[in-house]
Image (cartoon, coloured by chain):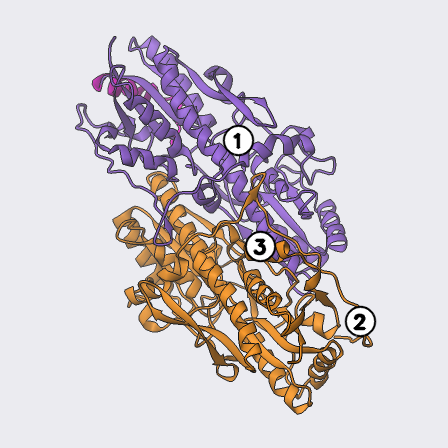
Chain colours: A orange, B purple
Amino acid sequence: MTIKNAFYAQSGGVTAVINSSACGLIQTARKLPDRIGTVFAGRNGIIGALQEELIDTGQESDESIAALRYTPSGAFGSCRYKLKSLEQNRREYERLIEVFEAHDIGYFFYNGGGDSADTCLKVSQLSETLGYPIQAIHIPKTVDNDLPITDNCPGFGSVAKYVAVSTLEASFDVASMAKTSTKVFIVEVMGRHAGWIAAAGGLASSDETHVPVVILFPEIEFDRKNFCRHVDELVHSDGYACVVVSEGVRDRNGKFLSDQGLTDAFGHAQLGGVAPVVASMVKQDLGYKYHWAVADYLQRAARHIASATDVEQAYAVGKAAVKMALDGANSVMPAIIRTSDDPYEWVIEAAKLDEVANVEKMMPRDFITDDGFGITDACRRYLEPLIQGEDYPSYHRGLPSYARMKNVLIGKKLAPFEI
Amino acid sequence: MTIKNAFYAQSGGVTAVINSSACGLIQTARKLPDRIGTVFAGRNGIIGALQEELIDTGQESDESIAALRYTPSGAFGSCRYKLKSLEQNRREYERLIEVFEAHDIGYFFYNGGGDSADTCLKVSQLSETLGYPIQAIHIPKTVDNDLPITDNCPGFGSVAKYVAVSTLEASFDVASMAKTSTKVFIVEVMGRHAGWIAAAGGLASSDETHVPVVILFPEIEFDRKNFCRHVDELVHSDGYACVVVSEGVRDRNGKFLSDQGLTDAFGHAQLGGVAPVVASMVKQDLGYKYHWAVADYLQRAARHIASATDVEQAYAVGKAAVKMALDGANSVMPAIIRTSDDPYEWVIEAAKLDEVANVEKMMPRDFITDDGFGITDACRRYLEPLIQGEDYPSYHRGLPSYARMKNVLIGKKLAPFEI
């Protein structure tokens, strides 16, 4: 059987566990040297492939590869670079095939979210028309949790755990001070279009904790009057309120509550700062003392409080990607299929990429309470398993022992390519 | 020997470990039933004493009291309420003595920062002049780490660990995306006057991690031009920069970079939102893509990543306070005295309250690098021991098992008192 090399790239916003997928993939490939040659990683994602900057992961020790499981961020570099459509920029796709051919690469593993799934789909299609056979496998990753088919997206469970834990802790803080100090605490979390991350804040509230959480979802049109009335009721009944607001919340005109006017390379609006906007409303309309936090990158990088379930699933999809490739699959994504809520059980199955790409999975309406400010029991049954278990990194001198790779590039064989 | 009851109150901003001090105090008192009667806790701090709202901690099980060690926030409620001076409001001090006398309280334990130390000092002095003997012991607590004499203030080590870990994790994130995305990440941390918390961000940078951290201390006058030049140099040399900015940073006119115009009950300016101000400068002067976070309460409530050293010391000062009281001490504070940096060794000694109250310990200038943007080796030697060790709470269904007390109030014996 022919041995082919593999190309692996990390794409888009990184997470606390994307390196766990890399670990699963590389460790699995290393166990099959008669099937897979070298795993090359793209330096800074797909840009590394276009510019023929290929990291030889074979230069990394087994210990370093094992450490990927415990290291947040993208160890080989990621990027926000969306390949244009075939019509607009066919040369980029052709360049990829050239690079793959030059380095005897037969497997293309792309670790990312919805946009990356689309790129991966196009690569799988183009290789056929250009006569260079390459198997393109998409490995799911996005804290936004908005990919279809898969039960959840690796990266999400850990952010969900961070948000649930942080909301719980902050609520204890506020509860103990509310008599004379802050009565409304607002924490802004990620989630451009889908409210999955904000929903996780709802887990802080349970029959045991009784935390008065108010969630502002991007799926629900923001109504200032309703919101302030709801917060006011909670302050009267519970003494305080914790607001978890998604960065993507919009008003009735579809305008983001806070829009910095920036857009990222994918053309998405770049947000930030909705928490102080909401805080100002609380101050103006209710007069309560408030505090606000913006978790930003802290939430998606927080490997120290990663969900063990998430780490395991991230590893599993990396491992499954290799297995699927060696089984001859193309244009698929290893998807997590839930078979039981409690105990949480799941298997991995191949999802067709053309059913994954460009589909955004929003929160179902029945996961959100009628008043639009909380999560339902159905949502809780869905979310709870995803934050189960702790998977602590080891520590040295008080800090986590996160690893950096050597990231040795192989020699180039092709002419430079401008992007 | 006469058995007297004790009064314990939590004061000011709560921390991840103030309940560990409560745990140390109550557990120690429970072992000495022939010396100390009931420990009454003030409901919402000193307000509970003034209004005769006394929680009978004897109603809590041993398991609940043990759980205090693992629970962030102020379990009995805290408050921002500073007693006025004796001249301005003698009736409040007299009321305290009345309440203590009515409930046979001979020990006054006040768990707080600098303002609370001042209150505790006044109580200790007044009891003598009013002819009701009460021993007043101050138990140190403040994330700001600005009390004198003691090596550090319980609460600080855990915030320092949170900030160091978060800065490290976010820097890994930014490093892996900087090629095409965010080049400057800014995280705002607490510290109204002293830069201790911001300094902890410097621990993320070491010979192993090489993280390009820029710290903005309240002790150093902010100079926009110098700052932007420094950030620019790091982006050129390292590809990115992580800025840790203290909420208390001021410009050359002494004005807070961001001032919401609010003041708290102690008369301190209430801050928030310096991170977006700094981010705007980066955007305007350098044009780099940026992201910013505001940790706010998340940092001081983060029991999930508490420093084991901090938890232990918080417990130890609570325990020592009881011992000192039973040894007849009055108007003192158990202070942590460092005897060795590495290995970190410390003992607890009594510090005189009149040498503690109203003294703020700033960062020594030789803890800050000449350029004003980093920490020196001396600072590192000081800080490193304080973040050592992890002390994880237990988890249930993916969340920490934090405890809530029953907080049963005892019957009132006095007329109501308006504050």
Residue at screen point 53% across, 22% down: B346
> What residue sits right under mark 1 in the picture?
B145
Residue A242 left/right relative to B296:
left
> What residue sits right under mark 3 in the picture?
A71
Alpha carbons under labels 2 and 3: distance apart = 29 Å
The part of the chain drawn in magenta is B80-103
| Viewport quadrant of the C terminus of chain A | bottom right
**Kind of residue at badge 1:** Asn
Task: Find residue A129 and report its horizontal and vertical position in percent.
Answer: 66, 91
Residue at screen point 30% across, 22% down: B29
Alpha carbons under labels 1 and 3: distance apart = 31 Å
> What residue sits right under mark 2 in the picture?
A412
Q: Bin the neighbour count of mark 2 within 10 Å (Cα to Cα): few under 14, some 14-19, many 20 and up.
A: some
Q: Is residue B393 above or below residue A333?
A: above
Element on which disc 1 rests: loop
Residue B143 left/right relative to A35:
left
Q: Could you tell me if residue B251 is visible in this image?
A: yes
Task: Find residue A180 and report its horizontal and vertical position in percent.
Answer: 35, 38
